[in-house]
Image: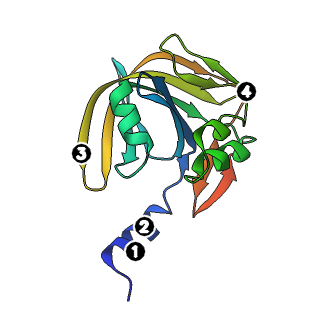
């Protein structure tokens, strides 16, 4: 019989979301992971909520560095999502996928994304199995020519315009 957690996960799988790679680099080191739990909070100041599992190796690194970049993957970057989703893959190997630059905050920024939000962490709140990071977007880039990669129903999807 399915548990409440099983039912919750199955229902949440019906909620499509952009696939993002979170990156951070600072005194605590360099890290990157694939996430889909990112949403806007406000446009004044420009801010995001980013949720990271407390068991993730990225969690303490983001907390210590106090900054992160949300790289919103374009629909042709599924391979990069896979590289950063493999928790057993060494961090240095993850960054071998894609072309990277460094932001003014010092975070790795992926080229050819649909968007990127270079952020300072304003608050970190522990809730359940995750840390909710409230982040101020210091620098924002986006492309009108690239659609983002979507995760829905436990599978990747590409956006297309319905007419």
Q: Residue at the spot x=68%, y=46% of the render? A: 159
Q: How far apart are marks 4 and 1 (CA)?
A: 37 Å
Q: What element carries label 2?
A: helix
Q: Where is residue 23 in the image (x, y as percent from the top left)?
A: 52, 31
- Name the residue carrying label 3: 126
In the image, 162 versus 142, the foreground residue is: 142
Q: Position of residue 38 (x, y in %)?
A: 44, 40
Q: Distance between the residues labelled 4 and 3?
A: 33 Å
- Name the residue carrying label 4: 99
Give the mark nearest the N terminus, 4 or 3.
4
Q: Do the residues labelled 1 and 2 touch (CB within 8 Å)?
A: yes
In the image, 160 versus 42, the foreground residue is: 42
- Name the residue carrying label 1: 6
Q: How busy is the neighbourhood of tag 4: few (under 14 within 10 Å), some, or many (20 plus)?
A: few
Q: How busy is the neighbourhood of tag 2: few (under 14 within 10 Å), some, or many (20 plus)?
A: few
Q: What element carries label 3?
A: strand
Left or right side of 64 for 141: right
Q: Is mark 1 on a helix, strand or loop?
A: helix
- Name the residue carrying label 2: 9
């Amino acid at each position: 019989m399915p548990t409440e957690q099983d039912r919750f996960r199955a229902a949440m799988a019906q909620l499509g979301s952009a696939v993002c790679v979170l990156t951070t680099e600072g005194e605590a080191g360099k890290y990157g992971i694939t996430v889909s739990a990112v949403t806007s909070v406000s446009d004044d100041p420009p801010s995001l909520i980013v949720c990271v599992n407390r068991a993730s190796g990225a969690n303490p690194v983001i907390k210590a560095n106090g900054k992160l970049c949300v790289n919103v993957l374009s629909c042709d970057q599924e391979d990069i999502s896979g590289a950063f989703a493999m928790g057993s893959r060494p961090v240095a190997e993850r960054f071998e996928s894609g072309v990277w630059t460094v932001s003014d905050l010092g975070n790795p920024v992926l080229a050819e994304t649909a968007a990127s939000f270079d952020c300072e962490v304003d608050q970190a709140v522990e809730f359940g199995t995750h840390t909710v990071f409230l982040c101020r977007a210091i620098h924002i880039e986006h492309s009108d020519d690239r659609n983002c990669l979507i995760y829905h129903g436990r599978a990747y999807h590409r956006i297309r315009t319905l007419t």
